[in-house]
Amino acid sequence: MSLLLLAFTCLAFVALCYCGKCWLSPFGNCRKCSGIGHKLKADRKGRLKRGRDCRRCDATGKRIRVGRWIYNRAARTYRAGTR
């Protein structure tokens, strides 16, 4: 019983921390381009050069976090239902 309570407490703490992170910083680095905004490619000599702009983040390097996206969708649905 004590182990179950400890596991639940840890899970609640992690979820609360993630909610705080989504509230304070709703945008995170793009996973496709690693926050650079474009892909890097190597030329013939092996030097890295700038490639094409990232299509996922539109070359900003930032994307909305999953938790914030879920919150925005739920808030939008709630507002649409109460009109």
Image (cartoon, rainbow, N blue to C red):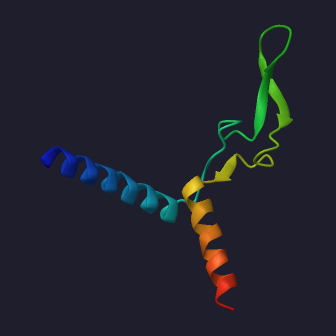
Is 41 situated above or below 65?
Answer: above
Identify the residue shown where x is 67% and y is 50%.
62
Name the residue located 77 percent from the left edge and 45 percent from the top edge: 56
Residue for point 77% across, 27% down: 40
Front-lying residue, 44 or 80: 80
Residue lying at the far left in this picture: please name it: 2
Relative depth, front residue between 82 and 72: 82
Q: Residue furthest front?
A: 1
Residue 21 x, y percent position in the rendering: 46, 57
In which quadrant of the rendered view does residue 67 lie?
Answer: bottom right
- Residue 1 at x, y percent in the picture: 14, 48
Q: Is residue 35 left or right of residue 18?
A: right
On the rendered structure, is 6 left or right of 14? left
Total numbered badges shown on the rendered structure: 0
Q: Position of residue 80 (x, y in %)?
A: 70, 83
**Where 82 sits versus 72, above or below?**
below
Which corner quadrant of the image does residue 33 belong to? Answer: top right
Q: Can you name the residue that lies furthest to the bottom here? A: 83
* 76 and 37: which is toward the camera: 76
Q: Is residue 72 left or right of residue 25?
A: right
Q: Is residue 7 left or right of residue 24?
A: left
Residue 23, placed above or below residue 11: below
Q: Percent position (x, y) of residue 14?
A: 36, 51
Q: Quadrant of the C terminus?
A: bottom right
